[in-house]
Amino acid sequence: MVGSGGFVQLKTKGNFNATVLGNPARIFHNDSVDLSDWDVTTLTGVKLPLEPETGPNGLPVPLNQTWARLLGKRDETAQGVCRVTFSFTNDRRPPGESECLSERYYDMLDSAFSDPKVTPDQCLELMDTIFGADVFISLPQLEGLLKTLCSTPSNARYSQLGRVRINLVARCFHKMMGGEREQLLENMTSVEERKAIERAVGAISLKFTPANPTGYHKLDLSDPVQREICMRLLEHRNNQFERECQFLHHAAKRRAHETEAWDEDPDLERVWRNFRMDGRPLRSSRSWKVPQKGFMEVDFVAITKPDQRDLEQYKALFVASDERQEMMNALADSEVMENEKLIMLRKYSGKDCFMSEQLADILNAFTHSDCRVEVCVIGFSRTLDWHGYRNVIKSLSPHELSSLHRRIGTINLFDETMAVDYYELDLGRPAERFVAQELIHLAAAEPGNNLVDTTYQNVDFTVPAGWLKDVPKTGIVSFCYCREQEVIEKVFTHGGWQDEDAEENPYHLREDGKPFGPVSWSSFAPKWLMSYCEERPAEGPKPCPQPKGDAWVKAYKARRVRAKMADKFKDPNRVFKAMDKDGGGTVDRKEMAMALFQLGIWLSPPELQTLLEVLDRDGGGDIDLLEFTQFWKTHTFE
């Protein structure tokens, strides 16, 4: 039994209804869904047990047998109405080889396809019977059935079976376990049939990458194929549940608030983000019943991370993968449209992972803001040394970074292990307030001056002790979070400065409690930032490069100001000309401050002060074009 959750009300008398309610019991018994997902389990006069009963031999009776006794028509006391709310019932990881099409069903299909007496309509009816919602197929099985359909003795029979081949591939397009769907289409079907299959599954299906579902999805739920994509996304969402719980438990230990209070706002949703049905915002739950029609929009985010097996596969493919080199060459080709590059990158991400440095090189191959954000979305869940992801997105402009935060979520982009960074947080947004409180807790636990150049509502500020328990729900707070090298190294190797911070830390431990280890560590950092980082040791643990102390703060702020100006103007000469109102060739401090405001480039007082200090090094009070262009060239995030 596989499908969406929802509310069910059934009379328990009769075999059919008893079977409907017995199927969830079977799933529960197989540990596919947690029993706590049931909200009501009461019959008229009968309360269904949540724990197995004890049999005559003292051993527990399987729960599904207990339910069958209560719900079966042989037990007249179980008559009445059962009202149940249950979660999406396919709560499992992508199916393994043991869950593919059974040998019996495979032989039935193979026999029917090879029998000239069986008509194409009968073949289609047989497929309708066999391919239920929870039936998957392996790539070798599908190739074998297609080979049978192609190995007919007559041309007439081959032509008749054309629509069977098309239907088979289209039906199994999202039910294949492993393998290359594109390669299958190229090798096993004619050009005409391949185009027919592409029309049948649609452009959305062709772009969907089951191994990397992170991204924006807009699905027409009245279309069976797009509805199938929705079901796959729901499977992936449930696969993230343990990881979500890990984050919640970690946060709950640090605050007096109830965990549920922090989980009620959609802004704190980690996986199923920006969910809309027919244009209306909707908060999804694990018991959400997928409607039969309507347009669904969601930014899906996979929060589980690559593991050692992905690293081994990456290393194995690094030398052998011609496709990887072909992709990198295409990305460097200025003649290839950026939208085409994104399609290629998305398809590649479904087969292989990235290293942080590689993702940074890919990002630099794109110039359009929306495309650069999409590159970061594609790479979020597929970066092997994922602690280096924070260093990759440092090259985004403020506008691009804001868009990425909306898509992926501020709460997902925060990495406690890589906390050294600049933060500007709107405390009116639950996710940003959450991150602010996490950082304040870290600052209280870790030694040194951690919160540097703090402002609240653009005024210099010292965080009061009361914020440790409750951060205000209004206002903009900004600061640079800093660490000394000793803290950086211990956080990487132990999971936190204090032992209690390391316990169940989702930034250090997997869902199974094992450390991510050096697999998640990266050697990548932007060139400008490396000069502020400790040189990595030749031997022993090599944590990701992070700037030590607070010497990096001024350099970062200057680059951030330059990025804000570059969001409005690409050419420094145009910026300077717009500021030089009198055309005298120089701009004084007051003139620059007023001109930037009029140009729509808002700088906070500390940012403006940093800009003027960097530009006016000789202290003369005036800045000329040469000084400004030199600043523009040297203060980039690359």
Image (tube, rainbow, N blue to C red):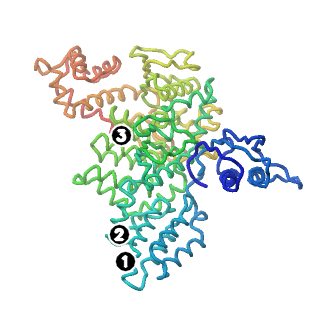
* Whether label 3 touches label 1, CB < 8 Å: no
Residue 590 visible, this orientation: yes
* Whether label 1 touches label 2, CB < 8 Å: no
Mark 2: which secondary structure? helix
Q: Nearer the viewer, residue 520 or 218?
A: 218
Q: Type of residue at label 3? A: Lys
Disc on the earlier residue, 3 or 2: 2
Q: Nearer the viewer, residue 284 or 586?
A: 284
Instruction: Give above or below for 85 relative to 340.
Output: above
- Residue of label 1: 159
Mark 3 or 1: in front is: 1
Q: Nearer the viewer, residue 194 or 451?
A: 194
Disc 1 and disc 2: Cα gap in Å?
11 Å
Q: Type of residue at label 1? A: Ser
Mark 1: which secondary structure? helix
* Quadrant including the C terminus: top left
Residue at the spot 47% in from the left edge and 59% down from the top edge: 174
- Residue of label 3: 527
- Residue of label 2: 193
